[in-house]
Image (cartoon, helix red, strand yellow):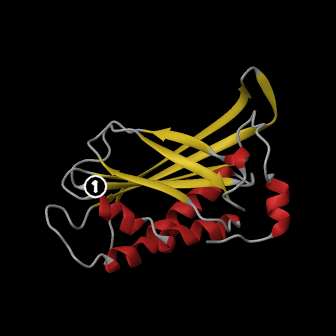
């Protein structure tokens, strides 16, 4: 199966101050959206395996764009999401966001932990909150974060928007303790 990308959108945010505190280094957050034509609109398809396999190419393109947008900055957290237009079904986004799609990003940035994700059926302009977690270990509390995303024309009824988000660090004012990023990195891969 060949998936058709209709458009890609990249959003780069740099955070300098939070809660009145100036960051030691800016926190860069990048979101890349691949909007694809849904090959299964208006019909139930029992075997979504071909869709899962076809997501590899999209994952590779998204990973390249994330690396470009991070411009040499490290990636310490990530998350992914899918918005499915109303002529599809939520399961279509889930089929596209498996490890087949996610591994190119892990490989490109060196992540090893599970990547949190969320999906929903939505009309154009719907919002979605993409949960972020640490690339080294999901138990690094300082890196639990969310990026809220919405695009006025996305997803159209016959589209699926696949959203991948990364950040160069945890929350700017994180101070709830627990396992720290450096300790998690020193422990080695926690891939699940």
Q: Residue at x 61, y 71 (%)?
A: 192
Task: Give whichever of 4, 41 is nearer the camera.
Answer: 41
Give residue 147's position: percent from left, percent from top: 54, 41
- Which quadrant would residue 171 be assigned to in this image? top right
**Relative to 93, 15 lies left or right:** right
- The residue beneath circle 1 is 159
Q: Residue at x 80, y 26 (%)?
A: 22
Give residue 36's position: percent from left, percent from top: 33, 59
Q: What is the residue that sits farthest to the left in this orientation?
A: 42
How many badges with numbers are in the image? 1
**Relative to 181, 160 lies left or right:** left
| Viewport quadrant of the N terminus | bottom left
56 over 178 or under it: above or below:
below
* Classed neighbour count for the residue bearing mark 1: other residues with Cα under 10 Å, few (<14), some (14–19), many (≥20): many
**Relative to 59, 14 lies left or right:** right
Q: Residue at x 50, y 47 (%)?
A: 130
- Which quadrant would residue 189 be assigned to in this image? bottom right
Task: Give whichever of 48, 184 is nearer the camera.
Answer: 184
* SS under mark 1: strand
Give residue 115's position: percent from left, percent from top: 57, 61
125 over 87 or under it: above or below:
above
Task: Give whichever of 174, 33 is nearer the camera.
Answer: 174
Give residue 82's position: percent from left, percent from top: 40, 54
Q: What is the residue that sits farthest to the top in this orientation?
A: 20
Q: Residue at x 49, y 56 (%)?
A: 117
């Amino acid at each position: 199966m060949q998936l058709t990308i209709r458009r890609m959108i990249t959003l780069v945010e740099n955070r300098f101050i939070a809660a009145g505190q100036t960051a030691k280094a800016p926190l860069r957050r990048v979101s890349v959206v691949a909007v694809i034509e849904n090959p299964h609109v208006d019909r139930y398809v029992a075997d979504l395996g071909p869709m899962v396999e076809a997501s590899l190419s999209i994952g590779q393109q998204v990973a390249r764009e994330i690396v470009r947008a991070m411009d040499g900055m490290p990636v310490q957290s990530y998350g992914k999401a899918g918005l499915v237009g109303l002529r599809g079904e939520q399961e279509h986004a889930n089929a596209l966001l498996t490890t087949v799609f996610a591994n190119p990003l892990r490989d490109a940035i060196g992540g090893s932990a599970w990547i949190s994700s969320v999906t929903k059926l939505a009309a154009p302009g719907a919002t979605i909150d993409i949960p972020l977690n640490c690339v080294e270990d999901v138990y690094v509390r300082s890196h639990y974060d969310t990026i809220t995303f919405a695009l006025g024309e996305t997803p159209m009824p016959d589209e699926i928007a696949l959203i991948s988000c990364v950040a160069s660090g945890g929350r700017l004012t994180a101070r709830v303790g627990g396992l720290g990023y450096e300790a998690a990195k020193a422990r080695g891969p926690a891939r699940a």
